[in-house]
Each structure stands twice: as structure tokens, then as C-alpha cells.
Amino acid sequence: MSPTASAPPAPPVAKTIAGIRSIVKDARAHGARVALAPTMGALHDGHLALVRRARELADLVIVSIFVNPLQFGPNEDFDRYPRTWDADLEALAALTADNTDGGAFSDHAEGAPPRRLVVFAPGVDEMYPDGPTQTRISGGDVAALFEGESRPGHFDGMLTVVAKLLNSVQPDAAMFGQKDAQQAFLVRRMVTDLNLPVAIEAVPTVREADGLALSSRNRYLSDDARREAVTLSAALQEVAAAAPRGTAEALAAGRARVEASSAVKLDYLAIVDPQTFRSVDERYRGPALALIAARVDGTRLIDNATVVLRSAG
Ligand code: PAF
């Protein structure tokens, strides 16, 4: 059989808000639960983990693909951000394999609501018909820390599009990667603060064999930079190993690991309280989140890991 003949059919694509709403309405009429996996495309296994989790929680899985101009700063990589539409559809089709009906999952039980995957891929004109929105969601103080300090306005642009996506799809649950821990924290806060009727799921980070967290930006790395990029996860491992000796020693161990690689320029290394996303001090005990951001040969990467500071007692 030729490869084309065996390729699973691509999932259906809705390009308008009215289109995706009508698909959701129809699915709900059949009793379907709905989950959204928001992405900017350039899909990798980390995104597919979001889709797999969504599939566990819902009958209709909507994968949004939209590179949101509002969350990129003027000197950031919006134009250069990878757009890999055909490969994205292929990767999503593979999740719905062994079907002739594009987008349908194979584990559909008799009498149950149809189980399927639909792509929501609005253009910029559909999401921002009047140009950038006048109304913005502000993530408050936490949105100005860490990623927000390096990327002013990023989180407000991200929260604004997430609010628009949630309103467009109105899912029961929405998936976010734990790799973007500050993003997941801020989305949860928005949902709580604004009483949005959706459950937010943080899906664990997917890593390469050497520990590098998967990211759409990894494809910018040269072979040399790719070898150095493991420094981020290695530094987090050093932080975790030194965490029983307290915050200062843990951070020092992580910094020492970054300084050992001349190709990696540290932006920040911090340990935060997962409940508040504020840096912890020496008195803090228990599970915390170690965050790192660094440039590797010009490409900015982030990662994080749970660490346990000085076990109590
Ligand atoms: O994490 C991302 O890919 C984006 O920030 C998101 C959540 C899709 C919003 O544009």
C-alpha cells in the first residue's frame, strides 16, 4: 500500500468562531463533553500530550492553532515563529488513526456521544477584526515577574487571547503545558478571578532523552546550541538535589551549573511558592517550583521543575 493510501484523514478545520461554536453546539446536543487544547501550532509531542489528556477528559477535543500577535513584543519572533500547518494536521490526524472519518477517535462506544478531534484555526482578522483589542485582560503583579519582566505585555496578550478562545469554544476543560508554568498559573488565576466555567488542567512537561523540555523554539537551535540547551534542565536538577539544604544553596548550585556553559546566558533562576508564584526565602519548606530562563546562542528557552526545600522537621 502506498504511504498516501494509508495516511489517516486530516481532522476537520473550523476557521471561524461561528463555525467552531456550531460544532460545539451540535456535539453538546449529543451529550458530548468538550475540551480545548490551545496551541500556536508547530506541534511537538508536548502539544500532543495536551491533546491526549483532552481526549481522556472529553468526547470533542478542539485543538486551536493561532499564533497570537498580541503576546509577542515588538522585538520578538512573531514573524519568524514556526508555522508548520501541514505537519501539524498530519500529527493530529495520526492521533485519530484507523478511522475513515477524519478527526474521529477510534475508541467510540456504541450509544455514546461521537468522539472526535476538530482543529480551530482562526486567522488574525477573525480573532482581531478591529485590530488589537481595546479591552485587555491584565495578569496583575505576577504577570510582571520572571517571563513578564523579560517580555513586557506578553502575559496580558496571552490572557486576552486565552479568554477569547475560551469564550469562542466554551469548553468544559482546557489544557496547558506545565512547561509554561507562569502561563498556567496566570490562566488559573484568570479563571478563578473571573468565574469562568472551565477546568484548567496542567499537563506535565515532555522532555527529550537528555532532559531538554520540548518547545517549538528548539527548532531554532543549531547542533552546538542544542547540545548546550540541556544546561537548563541540568541546572534544575542541581537545584532539586541541593534543595534539602535550603533556598540559597539550591540557587547557587543551579547557577554554578549554568556558569559552566559559556554558550548559555542566564536570564533568571528562581524558586517560587506554587500557590503565589512569588520567590521564596530561606525560611520556606516543602514543595516549590524552580524556574529557569536562558538564552542559548540567541534562542530564549524556559523550563521549570518541582523541588522540595528543606523537608520539615
Ligand atoms: O502556550 C501557547 O502556545 C500560547 O501562549 C497559547 C496558550 C496558545 C495562547 O496563545
Image (cartoon, rainbow, N blue to C red):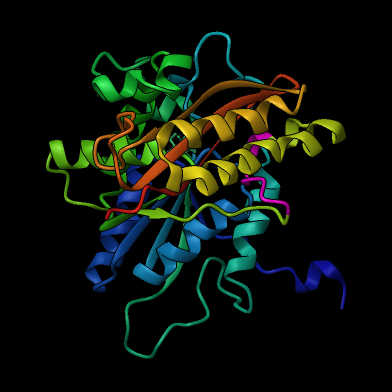
Residue 114 in the image: state x and y as whole percent: 38, 75
Answer whether residue 128 is visible to the viewer in this image: no
Say which quarter of the image contains residue 183: top left
Picture quarter containing residue 5? bottom right
Please give the range of residues in magenta: 210-217
- Residue toward you, 183 or 225: 225
Q: Residue lying furthest bottom in this view?
A: 110
**Figure check: 174 above or below 269:** below
Image quadrant holding the N terminus, namely bottom right
284 or 32, which is in the foreground? Answer: 284
Q: Does the magenta portion include 215?
A: yes
Q: Nearer the viewer, residue 265 or 21?
A: 265
**Residue found at the far top of this picture:** 74
Q: Position of residue 154 (x, y in %)?
A: 42, 21
Question: Does 35 appear above or below 76?
Answer: below
Q: Quadrant of ligand 1?
A: top left
**Residue at point 77%, 22% (across, down):** 262
Q: Residue furthest front?
A: 313
Which residue is depicted at the point 53% across and 66% down?
103
Q: Is residue 212 magenta?
A: yes
Task: Classify residue 218 as left or right of residue 12.
Answer: right
Q: Is residue 100 visible?
A: yes
The structure residue drawn at horizontal position 22% and vertical position 52%, both measured from the top left corner, is: 198
Predominant SS along the magenta part: loop
Q: Position of residue 196 (x, y in %)?
A: 17, 44
